[in-house]
Amino acid sequence: MTATHHHPQLLGRTEAELLGFQRRSLVQAAAVWTALGGWTAAQAQGRGNIVELRGDVLRNGEALRPGASIAPGDSVQTGPGSTVVFVVGDSAYLVRQNTRMALDGDTPAAVKALRLLSGAVASVWGRGRERQVIMPTATAGIRGTGVYAEVFAEQAYRGYFCNCYGTVDLAAGTESVVSQASYHQSFWAEPAPRDGRLLTPARAINHTDEELEFLAGLVHQRTAWQIAGRKGSKDGSGQMTY
């Protein structure tokens, strides 16, 4: 098994950006978050749910400050070189730079939908009622999974969606597919039909196993490949191969 099997292709992102989860500040912040009891303790103690805030991040159009919270009903926008990692209930999010998104939900602890307008978000979701990731060109129904979504505004808002593990109901226009993956099943969600299709196969791009493992750890989970003790190739097929 060679390490190159697990390196994603890069499309408009840098390797340094994908390695951001290894920053000492983020590792330390995650350790503190876990040691203090995670989401439940943060709620009980009135602490914020932001694990790390880096650079310029807006919540509902105003500058987000350390110690604040991001909740359903909020919009989030990150500037160049800026990221934010946060937890809501049993779900964890890593928002990349130059991203615009919003969270829908009925209670502070339950996200019903992540609306990604542009940019990219990696997220891990606990089991339970179905939630959604909504992009301009596709909608994904998710429950108990890890996913990565990216919207390329400069490509007519072409969408990319990776079911890193779990079961996802993905729909674009009149097309739909049920994705069951143990290791990265990826799709392009096209703004216009390509070879007659709106959902087309893709390779794993712009996100790493380690990022998903990091997010899973924030909500006391493990990824499918951590549990299985093996991985596959990032060809987008969704299967472990060895």
Image (cartoon, rainbow, N blue to C red):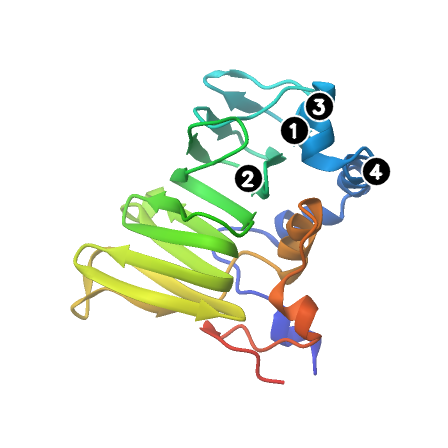
Q: Earlier in the sequence, mark 1 or mark 3?
A: 3
Circle 3 is placed at which residue position? 44
Task: Say which element carries label 2.
Answer: strand
**Residue at point 39%, 55% (across, down):** 160
Distance between mark 1 and mark 2 Cα atoms: 14 Å
Query: 213 or 150, which lies in front?
Result: 213
Q: How many neighbours does mark 4 have within 10 angstroms: few (below 14), some (14-19), or many (20 or more)?
A: few
Distance between mark 4 and mark 2 Cα atoms: 23 Å
Q: Can residue 68 be seen here?
A: yes
Distance between mark 4 and mark 1 Cα atoms: 14 Å
Q: Earlier in the sequence, mark 4 or mark 2?
A: 4
Three-letter amino acid code at disc 4? Ala
Circle 1 is placed at which residue position? 49
Distance between mark 4 and mark 3 Cα atoms: 15 Å
Three-letter amino acid code at disc 1? Asn
Three-letter amino acid code at disc 3? Ala
Q: Is residue 225 above or below residue 205?
A: below
Q: State if disc 1 and disc 4 touch (CB < 8 Å).
A: no
